Image (cartoon, rainbow, N blue to C red):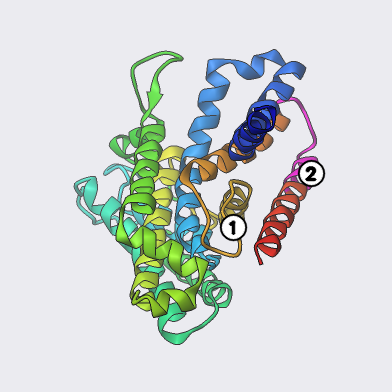
Amino acid sequence: MEAAKSMKIKHAFSQNAIWIVLVALILGIAIIDANFLSITTLRDMLIQSSTRTIIALGAAFVLITAGTDLSAGRVVGLSAVVSASMLQMPDYASKFFPNLPQLSLIIPIAIAIIVGLLVGLLNGVIVAKFNVPPFIATLGTMVAVYGANSLYFDMPPNNSQPIGGLRKDFTEIGTGAIGGGQFSIPYIVLIAIFVAFIVWVVFNKTRLGKNMYAIGGNIQAAHVSGINVARNLMWIYAIAGALYGLAGVLEAARTGGASNNYGNMYELDAIAACVVGGVSTTGGVGRVKGIIAGVLIFTVINYGLTYIGINPNWQLIIKGLIIVVAVAFDIRKYVAKK
């Protein structure tokens, strides 16, 4: 009986270890400064985590297939610039498109998300049809997307000036909330929760999700079992791109502007959050709740350590150590299975 009870406790701990680490991290910072547990601070962290969560969920699609997507951050930047360029106030002095009539809010948002989807689809075609390793394929598109975004951003009359003066109905998506006061619920947080739920459904209740795990677990076995690997990979990369596009739109709405440098290095934070959250670098393993916990851990590190006055350079060292340790444990588990 005692042995069975001990095994249950160990299993429960292993299944929820990342959440235990997250709570311990929050409590540790709160011991140093109790104000860290204020509703305002926790709300701010959730807002910061929202777009990062959507990017990480997109990256998880690719990671679970044993791939890597390095283009995520630059797609976020491109989508932010595309949406912002078409959603400036009519009387703003430095409009990106001076003669563009006021569009329905949904049109620029849809265009920006479709742009992200098309970049993701391009990644999928390169990986699935031309057998280019995902690391190289997405490295190439990362550079190309940044170049394309910079050319677009440099078009006259903008000439590489940060895009500002965004319409209130657009920025409301990123800064507005349901209710009032400290207990209001930001729209951007609700959007992230909704996206996480949809991704959970895809992961766990759809054929695409099952095929995704099968491809990541053993691509040869997936081929033999009749899965159209190429088609599934193209769908997976396209969905990831669409999620990056959505995140770019929300970043522009949250910050009230955009530039071609938006999203820089976001892909590394997303991959790190996924790995820390239990998404295996060898493919075939990953859960939505773990990904969310991984994002929250890095948000707490970034926000919390700054809150208590820790040098930002230490934050980078701590994040780097966490990533290395998480990957080391993941590789050990993979070797043990072999």
Q: What residue would you read off at disc 1?
A: 280
75 is higher (above) or lower (below) than 183: below
Q: Nearer the viewer, residue 254 or 316?
A: 316
| Residue 253, quarter of the rendered image | top left
Q: Secondary structure at mark 2?
A: helix
**Main secondary structure type of the part rendered in magenta:** helix
Q: Nearer the viewer, residue 145 or 140?
A: 140
x and y percentages locating residue 97 in the rendered image: 31, 57
Q: Nearer the viewer, residue 66 or 259?
A: 66
- Mark 1 or 2: the one toward you: 1
Q: Which residues are magenta?
A: 307-319
Q: Quadrant of the N terminus?
A: top right
Q: What residue would you read off at disc 2?
A: 313
226 is higher (above) or lower (below) than 113: below
Task: Judge left or right: residue 205 versus residue 41.
Answer: left
Give the residue displayed 40% in from the left and 31% down from the top.
175
Residue 94 can be seen, yes or no? no
